C-alpha cells in the first residue's frame, strides 16, 4: 500500500509528482530576511520551505514568519527543522505544516560511545523514545501536521551504531524503529529520509528501507537528498548521482539538492531531478569491459551534467564500471573529461581531487561558510587522498565529517573550530587562523 503525506495541501507520495523543497539559511530571528528569502525560493519554484528552529525563541519568530508570508499572499507550506529539543518540535507542530526531527538526536544521543545493551535494555530504550515522541504525534494529529523522520548518517545514535555499525543498515533500522512507533499510535502523515554526504551510503540505505517497506507492504513517502554535497558543479553532480539514481528506479517522492550556495540556487537542479526520467532519456550508453560510455547532445550545461550524472549513478547500481567516457558535441574534450572525473569522484570510483564535504548552512550557521568553502577549495583542492569537512555547526558537523581527515565546524559568531575526524583540536578561531592551522595539520599528515 502506497502511503501519502499531506503537507498543507502539497501531496507527497502515493503516485503524486515529485515535490521540490529547500531550506532557508537566514537567522530565523531575522523575520524580514527569512520572509524575503522564502519568497525568492518560492519564485524559483520551491514547493516546500524548511526553516531551522533551534530554541523556543525561534518558535516565536516562526509564527511571525508564517503570518508575514500569508499576509504577502505566499501560501507555501513551511517545515520546522528541529534538533535535540522535543518541546520545540511540539510547539512548532501547532504552527507549521510539517516538522522535521532527527532520530539520532531527538531523544537518543550521539557521543561516539559503544554501548553494550541486552535485548531488554535495547527494547526499553526504544520504548522510552516512543513515549517521548507520542506527545508530538498527538499534536500533529490535532493540527493536521506532517512529520519527516530525517535519519542522517552522521548523527545516528550510539544505540543504533553499537548494534548495526555505522552502516546503511543502521540508517534503515533507525527509520524502521520510528515507523513502528508511528504505526503504534496510528500516525500516518509521515515522510522518511536517509541522508549521507556519501552518495553510495545514501543510495544503499534508501534502497534498503524501500525493500523493507515493500516486505511490509506499506510504502511511506521518501525524501531524497545527498547532504553536505558542496557547491558549484561538484555539488550538482554529487546530488544528481545519488538522487537521480534512485528516482530512475522509481524510488523517492520529494527532493532537496543541498548546496553551499544561496538556497534559491538549489531549486533549479532540483526541478530538473524532479523530471529526471525525461531528462535521462536523452542519454545513450554502452559498456566496453570496465568502461561506461555515455552520449548526450543536450546543449544546456546544467541539464547535461545532471542528466549524465543521474544516468551514471543509476548505471553504477545495476552495471558497475570503473572508467567513464562522456561524449557531447556541444562541449570540448577538457570539459567532458572534467565532468566525468567529478562523476567518478562522486561515486567513489576514482578520486582526482580533494574530497570536500560542506553543508548548505542554515540559520544555525554563524560564519561565512560560502566564502570559507571557496578559500578551502582554492587552498586545498589538489589532494586526491584527502577528505576535508566544512560544516556550519555542531548539529551534524562532527558526525557527518567523522570519516574526514580534517575539517572545520562553526562554533560561534564568525569563528570555527578545527577538527581531526571527530576530535575537536582547537578553541573557536577566526577563519583565516583556522585555515592556517588546517594547512599545518595537512602538511604533517602528508609527510
Image (tube, rainbow, N blue to C red):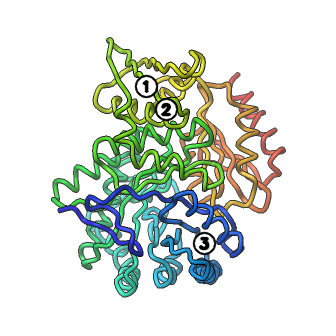
> Picture quarter containing residue 55?
bottom right
User: Alpha-carbon distance for marks 3 and 1?
Assistant: 45 Å
Which residue was labeled with disc 3?
54
Badge 3 vs badge 1, beta-carbon distance below 8 Å = no
Q: Mark 3 falls on what kind of element?
A: loop
For the point 57% across and 36% down, the residue is 234
Badge 1 density bin: few <14, some 14–19, many ≥20, Cα 10 Å: many
User: Alpha-carbon distance for marks 1 and 2?
Assistant: 7 Å
Q: Quadrant of the C terminus?
A: top right
Question: From the viewer's perspective, is 383 left or right of 184?
Answer: right
180 up-or-down from 332: above or below: below
For the point 61% across and 67% down, the residue is 39
- 178 or 223: nearer the viewer: 223
Q: Earlier in the sequence, mark 3 or mark 1?
A: 3
For the point 56% across and 56% down, the residue is 396
Q: Position of residue 5 (x, y in %)?
A: 33, 69
Which residue was labeled with disc 1?
296
For the point 46% across and 68% down, the residue is 100
- 33 or 119: nearer the viewer: 33
User: Alpha-carbon distance for marks 2 and 3?
Assistant: 38 Å
Question: From the viewer's perspective, is 212 left or right of 135?
Answer: left
Nearer the observer, disc 3 or disc 1?
Answer: 1
Badge 3 density bin: few <14, some 14–19, many ≥20, Cα 10 Å: many
350 up-or-down from 122: above or below: above
Badge 1 vs badge 2, beta-carbon distance below 8 Å = yes
Which residue was labeled with disc 2?
304
Q: Quadrant of the N terminus?
A: bottom left
Q: Mark 2 falls on what kind of element?
A: helix
Q: Position of residue 268 (x, y in %)?
A: 54, 49
Q: Earlier in the sequence, mark 1 or mark 2?
A: 1
Amino acid at each position: 500500500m502506497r502511503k501519502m503525506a499531506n503537507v498543507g495541501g502539497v501531496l507527497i507520495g502515493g503516485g503524486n509528482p515529485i515535490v521540490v523543497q529547500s531550506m532557508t539559511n537566514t537567522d530565523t530571528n531575522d523575520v524580514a530576511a527569512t520572509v524575503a528569502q522564502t519568497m525568492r525560493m518560492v519564485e524559483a519554484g520551491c514547493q516546500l520551505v524548511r526553516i531551522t528552529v533551534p530554541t523556543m525563541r525561534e518558535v516565536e519568530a516562526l509564527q511571525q514568519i508564517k503570518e508575514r508570508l500569508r499576509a504577502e499572499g505566499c501560501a507555501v507550506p513551511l517545515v520546522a527543522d528541529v534538533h535535540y529539543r522535543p518541546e520545540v518540535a511540539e510547539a512548532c507542530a501547532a504552527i507549521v505544516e510539517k516538522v522535521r526531527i532527527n532520530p539520532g538526536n531527538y531523544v537518543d544521543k550521539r557521543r561516539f560511545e559503544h554501548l553494550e545493551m541486552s535485548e531488554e535494555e535495547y527494547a526499553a530504550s526504544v520504548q522510552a523514545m516512543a513515549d517521548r515522541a507520542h506527545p508530538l504525534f498527538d499534536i500533529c494529529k490535532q493540527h493536521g501536521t506532517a512529520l519527516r523522520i530525517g535519519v542522517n548518517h552522521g548523527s545516528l545514535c550510539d544505540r543504533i551504531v553499537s548494534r548495526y555499525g555505522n552502516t546503511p543498515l543502521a540508517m534503515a533500522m533507525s527509520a524502521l524503529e520510528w515507523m513502528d512507533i508511528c504505526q503504534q499510535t496510528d500516525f500516518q502523515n509521515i515522510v522518511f529520509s536517509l541522508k549521507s554526504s556519501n552518495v553510495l551510503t545514501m543510495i544503499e540505505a534508501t534502497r534498503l528501507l524501500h525493500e523493507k517497506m515493500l516486505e511490509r507492504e506499506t510504502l511511506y513517502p521518501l525524501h531524497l537528498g545527498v547532504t553536505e554535497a558542496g557547491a558549484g558543479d561538484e555539488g550538482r553532480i554529487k546530488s544528481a548521482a545519488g538522487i537521480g539514481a534512485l528516482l530512475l528506479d522509481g524510488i523517492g517522492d520529494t527532493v532537496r539538492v543541498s548546496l553551499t550556495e544561496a538556497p534559491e540556487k538549489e531549486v533549479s537542479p532540483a526541478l530538473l531531478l524532479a523530471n529526471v526520467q525525461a531528462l535521462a532519456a536523452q542519454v545513450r550508453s554502452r559498456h566496453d569491459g570496465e568502461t561506461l560510455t555515455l552520449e548526450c547532445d543536450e546543449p544546456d550545461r546544467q541539464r547535461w551534467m545532471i542528466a549524465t550524472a543521474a544516468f551514471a549513478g543509476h548505471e553504477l547500481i545495476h552495471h558497475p564500471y570503473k572508467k567513464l567516457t562522456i561524449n557531447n558535441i556541444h562541449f570540448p574534450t577538457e570539459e567532458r573529461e572534467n565532468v566525468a572525473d567529478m562523476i567518478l569522484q562522486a561515486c567513489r570510483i576514482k578520486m582526482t581531487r580533494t574530497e570536500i564535504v560542506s553543508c548548505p548552512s542554515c540559520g544555525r550557521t554563524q560564519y561565512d561558510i560560502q566564502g570559507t568553502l571557496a578559500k578551502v577549495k582554492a587552498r586545498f583542492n589538489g589532494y586526491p587522498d584527502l577528505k576535508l569537512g566544512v560544516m556550519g555547526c555542531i548539529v551534524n558537523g562532527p558526525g557527518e565529517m567523522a570519516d574526514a581527515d580534517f575539517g572545520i565546524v562553526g562554533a560561534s559568531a564568525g569563528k570555527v573550530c578545527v577538527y581531526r575526524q571527530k576530535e575537536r583540536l582547537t578553541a573557536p578561531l577566526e577563519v583565516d587562523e583556522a585555515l592556517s592551522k588546517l594547512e599545518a595539520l595537512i602538511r604533517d599528515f602528508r609527510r
